[in-house]
Image: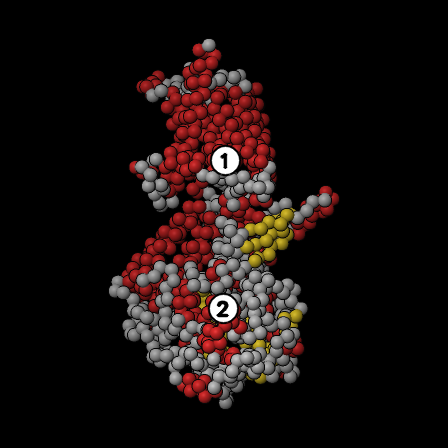
């Protein structure tokens, strides 16, 4: 690969050519929001990619430090807004860990169901936009059709379709509506057939293979060192999934596999996310069928005030390891320090490393493959 | 907003601001009155592990391997962390990554906390994880304003943006970083918004000596005076 | 007087208007077909089933503000859309919609050569438009357009030459007549050529999977990033007119043009009740549909992959096809 890059550069010196600086974003159809990438190009080949972020920095961390513990749940919705339930889950579990609260089993099961539904919805959005970036337009509308099912389920559960505010410290605000679990199962059946549709359009498509095979290859060691998480890390063959390694919610009670890639390229990351759809469906089925009876809210004081101390609690969001580092001073009703370890932010860091030597057309594919949500990157 | 105003009015030398009567703050600590919180905490509790609890092998290995670097081992709700001085950080980090028993090859997070009353006001916190041995450890470094904290980018490239964020949000003096620029805030921003004494309202970009200054800019002078009183 | 001026002028007027109207309805058809392919409805608001959308869209575009960027090369910037539309319309002058002179404007002996040369001019509009915008995305797009033109034009022309060898004429009417004499559509005699020309046509018209100069998601619209209003619409018209041109050429050269299927089989002569131009338009419509279908199905090639495909696959196949055709012509 390096030889290919070097040759034109030598020609460039001979003919006195110059690098082209191309500003991609913050308004660009495939930067998934307001990401700005300043590309230095040699012809169409990327020499350097510098990400400029912070266009929708709202200071969520600072904001949370000045809200009380219950109000923060809805602020976490606004970070990864396509996977709000997982953000909720991470936060409430972190506070529960700090308070050492026992959460009823039913609540943990329902949380798992919500988190897995959310993973399917988030991956649907990823699949659609990723395929759209590479030009396959139809996949977007297909995957949004299924995402709509999930949003309907969420709407039925908590009334909201995007920012759910669906969990509370100690449990859940409400039990599931009657018949909701049946509809989740029905959705699982539908989703399984629709996955074949996506695969038919993309998996063995020569153009899709050409556009994703060997693009943005990163080895397992590099990916770990760069702090990649979630599907991009697993795509490089590193077995790392918070659901397995540090089980939260009710994950330890279910059987599921962690798909791993071998080559660490964009195609592997695509296959892994498609496999994760299936694993999520598997978890959903087990969770719904084994849903225990009981309360959905644990014993929590009315005024939530964890004892002084600090903790870091990770959960596996659709994007990767979403960690909450929370410090309580034990006296006030708000956290002293509220820190989010945003998976999109850490994955985006690798963009420069992934892009080097590839073409402009691959940059959009790579932005798609690391699956960022700018609300979470910028916070 | 009110919290911040009151907290800072108790700072050592507030010019032209009469100090708040102490008892009020003390009483309000017990009552749930949001307007007057207790005085700001002096620092994290950093509790020692309970009696009879042995630190895990990797902490023991660290204590043995880098002699004298670990100044304190703390344990809270299942999380282990160690406090190390800033000048030994790189040594500790390299040991933690390379020692097979530790194997912390994954730097999950770098962040900081700010405790203004303390002399070394910043805690820079490295959340580490080992994808080989599947355990976690937090490393903490204390630093005063302007104290150099070495960059761990050379050990974990993942720390690059995270350290930039710590610099951007807290103004921790991170040295030997390959590309230390602001990341979330615009390049020309004044001040570091995650610090506890950063004003919550008003023209934050003009960071003022005294956070109450924004009242003087914002409101009519006499109104501001009454607010301060 | 009547024959030399009035009738040709009338023909041209009818033809140009027909093409332009066809383009607007082609856009509607594309949106509808894409909608059905993508589990949605497509335009539904204007008129029954959104049919009037085809009329409303051009009106909207005409009424839009026409912006010229301050740093653009104003003359070239204005000229570029015209340069891309005019060749697309001119090509129709030599396309016969039926056997008698009423159905075509001009019958020239080197009709195919004329078509090839004129369609090649069309790409100048894109190159100049991208260049004169004085902006980086359009610049990259115009570079891509010229590279694409070189890689595809050669393969397509060589393939067409093999068809010309089979037909023994460059005249468009002659090619159709040759198919009648052969008793077979050239699609069956030259299947490789047929596929190659169609794929090359996709590349020529910048359609997915070869829409690199446009590449909405990479180059934000490519060469027409800086265009707006009617100038943008001219590019749009040119692109869709080119799609019709390619469909017309493929239908004419490989699928018997205006002839009904099996023109030599007497038993099917009742099919002659349908006028020839209807047959021809039906065939064109079929290929337009395939164009849209492909757009709804495929991702986009990358620039270097497209070049590799053109140079390493299509040109060798085209040469091989040409040689085989020549041998067959000599031997048979």
Residue in the image at 61% along x and 77% along y = B143
How many other residues sit within 10 Å of disc 1, few (<14), some (14-19) or many (≥20)?
Answer: many
Residue A311 appears in the figure = no
Alpha carbon separation for disc pair 2 and 1: 50 Å
Instruction: Give the letter of the chain under mark 2.
Output: B
Query: Where, by quadrant of the figure, is residue A296 drawn?
Result: bottom left
- Across and down, in percent, residue A37 comes to 57, 54
In the image shown, does A69 or B82 lie closer to the viewer? A69
Q: Which mark is residue B218?
A: 2
Q: Position of residue A129 (x, y in %)?
A: 46, 51
Whether B78 is drawn above or below C327: the answer is below
- Which one is nearer the viewer's eye here, A162 or C244? A162
Q: Give the residue furthest to the left.
A: A178
Instruction: Estimate the x, y position of residue B99 in percent, counting from the top left.
Output: 62, 75
Q: Which residue is at a point 57% across and 60% down the rendered structure image?
A: A350
The residue nearer to you, when weighing A162 against C200, is A162
| Of labels 2 and 1, the one closer to you | 2
Where residue C231 is drawn, which disc sits there? 1
Residue that lies at the very extreme toward the front in this rendered image? B222
Find residue C257 and name its label. none
Q: Secondary structure at mark 2?
A: helix
Mark 2 is surrounded, within 10 Å at the Cα level, by few (under 14), some (14 to 19) or many (20 or more) other residues, namely few
Circle 1 — which element? helix
């Amino acid at each position: 690969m390096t030889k290919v890059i070097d040759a034109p550069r030598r020609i460039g010196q001979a003919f006195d050519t110059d690098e082209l600086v191309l500003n991609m974003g913050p308004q660009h159809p495939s930067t998934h929001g307001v990401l700005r990438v300043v590309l230095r190009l040699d012809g169409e080949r990327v020499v350097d990619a510098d990400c400029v972020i912070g266009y929708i920095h709202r200071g969520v961390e600072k904001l949370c430090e000045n809200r009380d513990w219950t109000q923060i749940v809805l602020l976490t919705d606004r970070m990864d807004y396509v996977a709000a339930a997982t953000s909720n889950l991470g936060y409430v579990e972190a506070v529960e860990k700090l308070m050492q609260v026992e959460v009823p089993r039913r609540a943990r099961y329902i949380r798992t169901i919500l988190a897995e539904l959310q993973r399917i919805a988030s991956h649907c959005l990823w699949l659609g936009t990723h395929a759209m970036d590479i030009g396959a337009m139809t996949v977007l509308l297909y995957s949004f059709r299924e995402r709509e099912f999930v949003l309907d389920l969420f709407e039925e559960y908590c009334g909201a379709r995007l920012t759910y505010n669906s969990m509370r410290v100690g449990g859940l605000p409400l039990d599931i509506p009657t018949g909701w679990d049946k509809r989740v199962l029905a959705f699982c059946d539908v989703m399984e057939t629709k996955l074949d549709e996506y695969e038919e359009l993309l998996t063995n498509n020569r153009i899709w293979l050409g556009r994703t095979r060997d693009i943005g290859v990163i080895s397992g060691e590099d990916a770990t060192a760069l702090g990649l998480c979630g599907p991009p890390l697993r795509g490089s063959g590193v077995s790392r999934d918070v659901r397995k390694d540090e089980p939260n919610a009710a994950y330890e009670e279910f059987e599921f596999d962690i798909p791993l890639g071998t080559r660490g390229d964009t195609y592997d990351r695509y296959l892994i996310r498609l496999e994760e759809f299936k694993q999520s469906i598997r978890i959903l089925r087990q969770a719904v069928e084994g849903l225990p009876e009981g309360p959905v809210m644990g014993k929590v004081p009315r005024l939530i005030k964890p004892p002084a101390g600090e903790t870091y609690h990770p959960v596996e969001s659709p994007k990767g390891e979403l960690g909450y580092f929370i410090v309580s001073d034990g006296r006030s009703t708000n956290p002293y320090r509220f820190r989010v370890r945003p998976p999109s932010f850490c994955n985006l860091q690798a963009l420069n490393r992934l892009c080097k030597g590839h073409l402009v057309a691959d940059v959009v594919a790579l932005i798609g493959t690391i699956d960022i949500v700018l609300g979470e990157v910028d916070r | 907003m009110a919290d911040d105003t009151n907290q800072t009015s108790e700072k050592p030398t507030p010019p032209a601001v009469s100090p708040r009567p102490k008892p009020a703050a003390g009483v309000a600590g017990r009552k749930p009155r949001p307007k007057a919180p207790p005085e700001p905490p002096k620092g994290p509790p950093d509790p020692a592990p309970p009696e009879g609890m042995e630190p895990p092998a990797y902490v023991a290995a660290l204590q043995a391997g880098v002699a004298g670097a670990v100044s304190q081992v703390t344990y809270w709700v299942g999380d282990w962390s160690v406090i190390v001085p800033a000048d030994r950080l790189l040594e500790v980090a390299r040991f933690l990554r390379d020692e097979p028993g530790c194997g912390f090859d994954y730097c999950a997070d770098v962040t900081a906390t700010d405790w203004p009353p303390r002399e070394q006001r910043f805690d820079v916190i490295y959340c580490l994880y080992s994808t080989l041995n599947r355990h976690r450890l937090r490393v903490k470094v204390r630093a005063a304003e302007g104290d150099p904290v070495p960059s761990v980018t050379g050990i974990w490239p993942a720390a690059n943006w995270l350290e930039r964020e710590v610099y951007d949000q807290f103004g921790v003096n991170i040295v030997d970083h390959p590309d230390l620029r602001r990341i979330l805030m615009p390049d020309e921003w004044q001040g570091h918004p995650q610090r506890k004494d950063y004003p919550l309202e008003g023209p934050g970009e003009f960071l003022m000596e005294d956070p109450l200054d924004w009242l003087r800019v914002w409101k009519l002078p006499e109104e501001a005076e009454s607010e301060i009183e | 007087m009547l024959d030399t001026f009035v009738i040709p002028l009338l023909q041209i007027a009818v033809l140009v208007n027909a093409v332009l109207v066809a383009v607007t309805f082609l856009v509607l058809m594309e949106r509808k077909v894409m909608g059905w392919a993508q589990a949605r409805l497509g335009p539904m608001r204007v008129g029954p089933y959104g049919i009037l959308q085809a009329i409303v869209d051009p009106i909207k575009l005409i009424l839009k503000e026409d912006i010229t960027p301050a740093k653009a090369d104003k003359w070239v910037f204005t000229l570029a859309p015209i340069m891309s539309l005019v060749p697309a319309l001119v090509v129709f002058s030599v396309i016969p919609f039926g056997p008698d002179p009423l159905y075509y404007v001009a019958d020239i002996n080197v009709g195919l050569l004329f078509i090839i040369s004129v369609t090649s001019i069309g790409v100048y509009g894109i190159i100049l438009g991208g260049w004169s915008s004085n902006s980086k995305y359009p610049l990259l797009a115009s570079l891509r357009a010229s590279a694409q033109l070189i890689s595809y034009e050669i393969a397509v022309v060589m393939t067409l030459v093999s068809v010309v060898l089979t037909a023994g004429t460059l005249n468009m009417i002659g090619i159709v007549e040759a198919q009648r004499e052969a008793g077979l559509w050239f699609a069956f005699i030259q299947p490789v050529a047929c596929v190659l020309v169609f794929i090359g046509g996709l590349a020529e018209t910048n359609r997915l999977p070869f829409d690199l100069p446009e590449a909405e998601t990479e180059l934000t619209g490519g060469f027409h990033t800086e265009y707006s209003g009617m100038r943008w619409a001219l590019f749009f018209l040119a692109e869709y007119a080119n799609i019709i041109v390619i469909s017309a050429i493929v239908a004419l050269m490989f699928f018997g043009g205006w002839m009904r299927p099996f023109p030599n089989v007497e038993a099917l002569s009742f099919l002659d009740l349908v006028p020839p131009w209807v047959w021809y338009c039906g065939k064109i419509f079929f290929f337009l549909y395939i164009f849209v279908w492909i757009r709804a199905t495929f991702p986009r090639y990358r620039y270097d992959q497209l070049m590799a495909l053109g140079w390493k696959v299509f040109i060798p196949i085209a040469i091989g096809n040409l040689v085989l055709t020549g041998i067959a012509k000599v031997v048979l």
